[in-house]
Structure formats: C-alpha cells, structure tokens
Amino acid sequence: MKKIFYLLTLFLSTSLLAQDYTEYVNPFIGTSNYGATNPGAIAPRGMVSVVPFNTSGKGNKMEKDSDWLSFPYAYENTIFTGYSHVNLSGVGCPDLGAVIVMPTTGDLNIHPSEYGTTYSKETAKAGYYSNFLEKYQVATEVTATQRAGISKYKFPAGKANLLLNLGQALSNESGAMVKVVNDQEIEGMRMIGSFCYNNPKTIYPVYFVMKVNKKADRTGVWQQHNKIDGIEAQWMSAYNGQQRIIEDAYYPIIGDSLGAYFSYDFEVATEVEVKIGISYVSIENARENLEKEVSNVSFDEIAKRAKDNWNEKLSRIEVEGGSDDDKTVFYTALYHSMIHPNVMSDVNGEYPEAKTRKTKKTEGERYTVFSLWDTYRNLHQLMTLVYPEQQLNMVNTMLDIYDETGWLPKWELNGTETFTMVGDPAAIVVADTYLRGLRGFDEQKAFEAILKSAYPVEGGNPVRPCVDNYIKYGYVPVEDELEDKLWGSVSTTLEYTVADWSIAQFAKELGDQEKYKEFYNRSMGYKKMFDKESNFLRPKHMDGKWHEPFDPAHGANFEHNIGYVEGNAYQYNLMVQYDIPGLVKQFGGSKAFVNRLDEIFEKDQFDMANEPDMAYPYAYNYIKGKEYKTQDKVIELREKYFTNKPDGIAGNDDTGTMSAWVVFSMMGFYPDAPSTPQYALTTPAFDKVTIKLDNDVWGTDELVIKKEGGNTNHIQSIKVNGKTKKGYFISHKDLVGAKEIIFTTK
C-alpha cells in the first residue's frame, strides 16, 4: 500500500512538473479579422520571428500591394512566397516583413508572382511552425531563438533552390546589399522603416548572415536594373529595366530589388537546414548571434529549447477549471503579450543608439517596439505584476532613449521614433511602474524626463504638440486641429490629462507637493471639454464655444472625425479612468452616468477593437449596486470577441494590448485606471488561478485566486486572506500581499 501511495505521489509530482502550457497556445488566433498576429515561430521577446509570408501573390484574398495590410500572414490566404525573418505582431501599419527565404524545385525562377505556391498541413505551436508546399512537394519546418531563425526543408530528388529575396517585404523602403560568401553562406543587409509614414526619415538597415548545411552546386545573385531611356538604351535591351541574374558573384552587390540563390541537384530526397542570424548593428554581430545561439545545435534541439522557454514564461500563471477553449484563449493571449516589446540588443550587448544609430552597449537587455499609446493601458501593468524583470528592462530602455534623444519614446521601433498616435504615453508607463512599487530605475531621471515632455520647448515639443495652448486654455482648442497641428483635439486633451495625472501622482510619491498640485490641476482640464447639455466631451474653440456640427456617433470604425482619434464621442465619453467619481459628478449623478454607459453598449457604440473605451465594462464598479453589470459585460465581451478561432481577437492585437485585456479579465481583475495602482474586480473565468510572483520584488511568491459557489457569474462575496472585502476594487499593494482571494458566486 505504501509503495502504491509513493508511486502515485511520484506520478502526480512528475505530471505537475511536466505541465505543458504550450499545448494551450494556438498561434492562429488573431490571424484573421485584422488581428495582425501571425503563426510564425518566435522565442519570448524575440528579435527574430520566422513567419510564413502569404500576403503577396496572385490568388490571395488579401494582398499587401492592393490593400492596407500590416501583417505578413493572413489566415484566409493560400499563396506562400517564403519565410520572413523580421516581423511585427498585432500592429496597424505595414513594416518589416523582410529577409525572406523561399524553397523551390525545378528550374530557377526568381519572380515571387510566379514561384508562389499553395500549401497544406499547417501546424503552429509556440516556437514552431510547419507546412507542405504543394507545387514543390517540399515539407517545411521553422523554429527560432531570440536572434536567429532556423528552417528545415525536405526536398524531393531533383533540382532544388533556396531563394533569399531582399526585394520583397512589408516595408515600402527599398535598398539592400548582398554578398555570397561561399557555397554555404550569404551575408548582407536590407533597408526597412517608415512605419505609418509619420516620420519618413526613419529608415535603417537590418543585417543578416545565412548559413546552409549543404554545399550549393550553383550560386548567384539577381538584381533589378533601373529603366534607362535615351541613346544608352540602344545597347542595354537585354537587361534594361529587367531583373538580371549574375552567377558565381562572390562580391557585394547593391541595389533595390536584390536576391541571392543556392541551387542543388539532389540524387535522392534531401533535408536542408538553413540558419539565419539577425542584427540591427552589423553583419559581424549577426554572425555572432548566429554562432552563439544556434551553431552546432540541431533543429529539433532548438525547437525544444523554444518550447521550454515558452513553458517557463507561461508557467508564471497557472489556471485550473474552465474549458480547453478557455485555457487556449488565456494562454494564447499571454503568449501574444510576450512578443512585444522585444529584445533589440545582440548577444554581446550591442545595439544601435536611438536617432544616430551609433553602436552602444547595454548590461541588461535593450528592448524595442514600444507601441505605448496601446500598451500603457494594461500590458505594462501585466509585466510589472508577473514579469517585473522584463518591465524594468523596458523602463530602463525608455530612460536610455531619453539620454540618447532628449525625449522619452512615443512609438519607438528599432531605434527610430515614428511619432505614431497621440498623447504622452511614456510618462504614464514610467509613473505607473513606479507607483505600483517597481523601483529598479533612476527615479530622479525618470521624473526629469516626464516633466520635460510636459512643457513647451523652443522649436516645438515633438511629444506633446500644442502643449502651450493646452496649458493656456486647460484643453487643446479645436483651432490647433483645424490648422493640422495635431490630430483629435478632444482625444489629445484626454491623453495629456492622463499623463498629467500620472506626473502628479509620481510627484506626490516623491514628495514634490508643488508639482503635484500643478499637474493635478492640469489633469482636471477634461472638465472644460464636458458639455453638460449633451453629457459628452466635445471639441471646443479658443473662445469657449463648442465646435459645430456635432454628431456623437460620427467617427466610428476609423472614419475621420473632428475632435477624436480612431473613434467618436461615445468611445471617448468616459476615458477619464483616473477620475470616474469626478466624471460622475459632471454627469449630474450616478443615474445619468449609468444611463450613458448602458446607452454606449445598447447602441453598439462600444468598440472592443480599440483602446480608448476598453476599460468601460469596469466602470460599473464605481456605482454601488451596479457592479453586477461589470461581471455580465466582461463575460459577454470576452466570449463574443476572444475565441479559439483565427478571428478570435476583436481587431489589431496592438502588440499584445488586446491580449492583456483578456488575460486580466479572465483572472478576475483589471488595471482600469493607469497610474492609479488599483484593480477593478470581476468574476474569474477559472476555478483557480495561481500567479507566481517575484518574492524579491513583491515580498511573496504566490497569489491564489479561487472561484467558488453557485452557478451564476454574479459575485456574492469576495474574501481576501479570509476577510470579507467591501467594494469591487483592490489596491496593487493589497493584491500582491494577498495569499488568497476567494470569489463566491451566487
């Protein structure tokens, strides 16, 4: 009997230790409905992702050159033209999608519109993807480390080719250099950049080294020649304006539409392995990244390491109960939240300095892809709570960018500032991180940096346009928008007030009462845009008159609208999360506030696919007796918009922001008010959630959340460490200090 008990205990312990969280990751979620995710192979926070490129080619439903596509892969598409190695996930503007490798068979063909193929047998897991290329009868598999991508191709007997296409990409930038080093290695670089076209000067190189485990029988480079007219064209007819192939070219070749190839004559079916190292510093660093991370390591071992790495990260949160689909939605969302921001520094610590791109070195990890207008609302709060070591690297990166450029980032991409979207989101992220108790950065430098962005400067403030008028009037007047000085006067005002609230709370924590009062008063400027006749925040002129005409429903679905950014007056109506009690007073009381909140949902004016109103479901928690509506609405939205299907994200994942919303919502708490270290509570999706905390940071190593009781989703009581809690909010300090939180439902 003792032996049986021992074996049972050993089995249970082994099973627990061997829990495979990646089995609940479905990388196809978000690859339809403009979710803009992809099923490619990537390591957590990886610089490199190996992604099937299928948005270029005849026969596809969605084609990058005939539509506004910001993603290299669409689930609906059927034509594959290779694997890209630098990519973005969940963004709204096209960029990267470059350094593409395509396996083919038969005679050499360098034209993507002709060599594209249908594919089948798609499989995608965390850190792994595979398919079968129908035209060529080639089975493909890919995996990745943080700075390198690895592909494995099973060719049939006969002629075979590996094409490295440097002309094709999502980026509309052109220009590349390629050099065939020998019959197993190619090196070079490709120019990319101009995300959202807000800052057309932001172009930069991505460097690569490609190594193949089989010697090529033939090598070469192709180049698009410029079209020349006039007398010179008479003797250039063979290649004028054409793509020309240069065989056995073992020297650097520069041009706009470049590529290189390795060709083979296989007597029997042969497996070929391709490894590509990437760097934003140099070819030498790309080679070092390749050698340090994947040299002399098999494809299967690298795939296993990628899976183990993902398992370690995903295991920080363990959920029990709920359906398999619930778990898949949850862990895939957690997976998507761990893609961006991503590592930019090489294995030797080098990275390109922001703005100048001079080579610098970091002792930690340099991060990039800061889509801060999106991520300040919830993703960084998730990182602070569960992955504080990563969040500290992110904040320290932001402060390094301040040192390098004189400004905190706004929407930073690979060392460039794109100035995409509005507001001053870095101030919010820095302050929120500090206010939640994560202190491993220079607080005085941080405070200096966020203050700089908050005032007018000679030559103009690139982070806060028209901040002078904002300070003068207490809001951004609509004249500034009508004169094309900024986008969305109401939206910009609200973003500035959230940032000012954040600065005020940071100042208060530092003991600076003068700055606290100044920025607190500035944060209340939203009240000047509140029209008490309509109960809307409206665009306002310098003379205090409301801008006309005004239609609160106009501007939904990204339709251009005076006053608002990517939304309408309904979707910005309550975007004052830091002062909901004050906003309720503006409405004239709880009844009017709840009526408007109900109206937003009932009239289908709530947009789950965009950020400004994503905290609205939690606003009911501020009204006593209406908290049940938060519980109902969160579950309704989660089940409607977040599913285990390719269209299972409401819209652009926005570098993990939508995913962070569902991660928090399924755990039963949400950071509804940036720079207010609290969480709004709701019904968890699971019977038990165990969050493994960093004991060195939070003073405890585990938080357990349980759901018990009846069959409804309405909360009857909440107990924290055995004591009944009043209200439906919990501070960050109390959350991380709680060993156990029990939600009892009716």
Image (cartoon, rainbow, N blue to C red):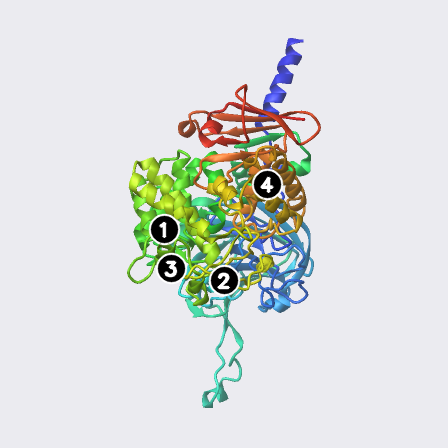
Q: Name the front one of labels 1 and 4.
A: 4
Residue beneath the point at 37% across and 45% down: 521
Name the residue carrying label 3.
466
The numbered mark, 1 or 3, whose residue comes first in the sequence reads 1
Q: CA distance from mark 4 to mark 2?
A: 27 Å
* Residue type (three-letter) at the residue carrying disc 2: His
Q: Determine the secondary structure under disc 1.
A: loop
Can you tell which mark lies on residue 408? 1
Q: Name the front one of labels 1 and 3.
A: 3
Position of residue 29 measured from the top left corner of the image (x, y, whole percent): 63, 47
Q: CA distance from mark 1 to mark 2?
A: 33 Å
The numbered mark, 4 or 2, whose residue comes first in the sequence reads 2
Whether residue 44 can be seen here: no
Task: Report if the CB atoms under discs 1 and 3 are less than 8 Å apart.
Answer: no
Q: CA distance from mark 2 to mark 3?
A: 18 Å
Position of residue 595 measured from the top left corner of the image (x, y, whole percent): 61, 44
The furthest residue to the right: 711
- Front residue of 161/290: it is 290
* Residue type (three-letter) at the residue carrying disc 3: Cys
Name the residue carrying label 4.
591
Query: Mark 1 Cα within 10 Å, few/some/many (few <14, many 20+)?
Result: many
- Left or right: residue 31 versus residue 588 is right
Q: Name the front one of labels 2 and 3.
A: 2
Task: Report if the CB atoms under discs 1 and 2 are less than 8 Å apart.
Answer: no
Q: CA distance from mark 3 to mark 4?
A: 36 Å
The numbered mark, 1 or 4, whose residue comes first in the sequence reads 1
The numbered mark, 3 or 4, whose residue comes first in the sequence reads 3
Residue beneath the point at 33% across and 45% down: 518
Residue beneath the point at 38% across and 39% down: 505
* Residue type (three-letter) at the residue carrying disc 1: Leu
Name the residue carrying label 2.
547
